[in-house]
Image: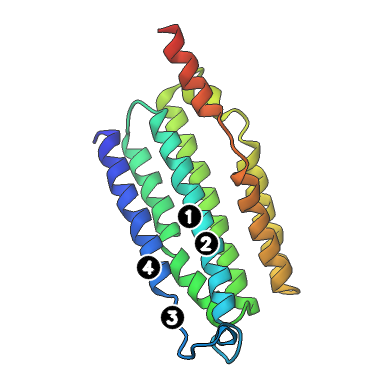
Amino acid sequence: MTKHRLEAFSDGVFAIIITIMVLELRVPEAAGVDALTAGPQHLHLKFICYVLSFVHVAIYWNNHHHLLHASRRVTASIMWANMHLLFWLSLVPFVTGWMGETGFAQAPTVLYGGVMLAAGMSFTILVGCLLRAEGQDSALDRAVGQDVKGKLSIAIYGVAIALAWVSPRASIALYASVALIWLVPDRRIERVLEQEQVHK
């Protein structure tokens, strides 16, 4: 399989995940702005959950794109690691909807963190498979480095899951902090690829 086919398939899954999430947002029956916060529907909380999950999925898509852009070949282990990542991400609409529907209840917030933690770990596995395929001192190896952000994200998810049993909203703040960490531009892969182009 070429990496372009893997990218195309993955892009399709990412698009479907975001589409399912936005379809879960129900239009309020009343016309007033207070309809977003009044009643048992938790529409404002559902929207917060949607934005949080949208940002997370968008970050995964961006990083996935950069990883494959810096890779030259696809192996069987890479394909399975990629499917492993997509499996966990495909559960994001479910946990997002449940957490928003229940107004940040404990169990849904814990499960949300569990899915995010599993997605983070599966992304780390995918990176490892790609690095093994590319070899030491490859462009990808130099770009990924120690992957401090990835390790920090997994640690924060673990803390947030435990905290959700005590204070779900504080846990949500930690989930959001992971997104903020990744929103800070990281041009390592782009810089390495630009340097390679210069040396050719």
In the picture, which quadrant includes the N terminus?
top left
Which is more N-terminal, label 1 or label 3?
3
Mark 4, secondary structure of its residue? helix
Give above or below for 118 relative to 124. Answer: below
Q: Is residue 138 visible?
A: no
Q: CA distance from mark 2 to mark 4?
A: 12 Å
Q: Is residue 95 left or right of residue 163?
A: left
Q: Is residue 42 visible?
A: yes
Give above or below for 176 relative to 200. Answer: below
- The amino acid at mark 1 is Val
**Local crowd size for mark 1, using a 10 Å CA cut-off: few (<14), some (14–19), many (≥20):** many
Mark 3, residue position: 26
Q: CA distance from mark 1 to mark 4?
A: 12 Å
Which is more N-terminal, label 3 or label 4?
4
In the picture, which quadrant includes the C terminus?
top left
Q: Is residue 76 left or right of residue 117?
A: left
Which one is nearer the viewer's eye here, 131 or 89? 89
Mark 2, residue position: 53
Mark 1, residue position: 57
- The amino acid at mark 3 is Arg
Which is more N-terminal, label 4 or label 2?
4
Rendered location of residue 24, percent (x, y) = 42, 75
Residue that appears at 33% across and 60% down? 16
Mark 4, residue position: 20
Q: Which mark is residue 183?
A: none
Residue that appears at 44% across and 41% down? 64
Rendered location of residue 147, percent (x, y) = 61, 35
